[in-house]
Amino acid sequence: MKIAVCIKQVPDTAATLRVKPDKSGIMEDNVKFVVSPYDEFAVEEALRTKDKIPGSDVVAITVGPKKSQEALRNVLAMGCDRAIHVNTDGQAGIDSLAVAKLLAAQLKEEGSELAFTGRHAVDDDNAQVSQMLAEFLSWPHVTVVNKFTLEADNKKARVERPIEGGSKEIWEVDLPAVIAATKGLNEPRYASLKGIMQAKSKPLKEVPVLQAGVPVTELAPKVVWSNYELPPERKAGKVFKDAPEKAVEEVVRLLREEAKVI
């Protein structure tokens, strides 16, 4: 089976971010970039699926600038067989719609039979690409998936997704399909030293964005991000040093009179 996993490189969630003076984005110098955490669940599930089907192949695909190849090398070290990088350097304003079109073009060229993605990327939090990718491929799509099981014939999959109230939905989808992973689907593996060394020699195909099978007229962004700013600093909390009984009275009073939550 030809399995694709679509990933995105994002700033580390633990990084301290600074906004550019013109508010056009974040300052990337000295910021560590990583594979988006939900994409790691997708990678792990792709690799587990490969292990269940002898002869399968897992290709990791990303759309982004040159530095995105670091993320591809990371998932190659985890166990992916190959990687494809659609290089967007020099093409400003690639939005979610364009990313989905570019990914769809690569999956069609690859003849992929199953695609995994993360439920959303933790930088922009859009949660749009996997849905649009499925639409451009005319494939079934299920998102926020925390359980994935292939049927015996490998032509259908049974997936579960949590819903509000602590319940779940169970879906049966025909393959090929796009599955968007969430936390709880699995426990992503760490890259071993052997895997890191092997990743250096695994194929990584670089495709310039203007040669990626999508007309340049379709890459113009529909959505433009601007005026970035950091959230306001939180006010200092109040510390109550009185005896517990008196402190409780004061907390209740402030919740009623200032916060107005009770």
Image (spheres, helix red, strand yellow):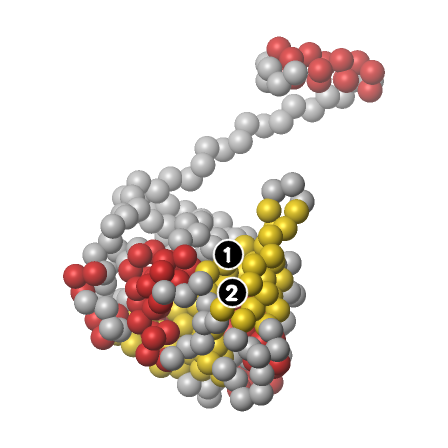
Placement of 183 over or under 67, stated as above or below: above
Counting from the top left corner in percent of width and height, residue 26 is at 37, 50
Q: Residue at x 29, y 60 (%)?
A: 98
Residue, far left: 217
Q: Which residue bears the numbered disc 2?
A: 173
Q: Between label 1 and label 2, give the one nearer the viewer.
A: 2
Placement of 195 over or under 36, stated as above or below: below
Q: Which residue bears the numbered disc 1?
A: 143
Image disc number at residue 6: none
Q: Residue at x 61, y 81 (%)?
A: 51
Counting from the top left corner in percent of width and height, residue 65 is at 33, 66
Counting from the top left corner in percent of width and height, residue 78 is at 56, 76
Query: Within the image, what quadrant is residue 248 found in?
Result: top right
Residue situated in front as seen by the camera: 259 or 25: 259
* Three-letter code, disc 2: Val
* Three-letter code, disc 1: Thr
Q: Is residue 84 left or right of residue 90?
A: right
Q: Is residue 70 left or right of residue 151?
A: left
Placement of 180 over or under 86, stated as above or below: above
| Mark 2 closeness class: few <14, some 14–19, many ≥20 residues within 10 Å | some
| Mark 1 closeness class: few <14, some 14–19, many ≥20 residues within 10 Å | many
Residue situated in front as seen by the camera: 245 or 109: 109
Quadrant (top left/top right/bottom left/bottom right) for the C terminus: top right
Q: Residue at x 21, y 56 (%)?
A: 220
Alpha carbon of mark 1 to alpha carbon of mark 2: how far? 12 Å
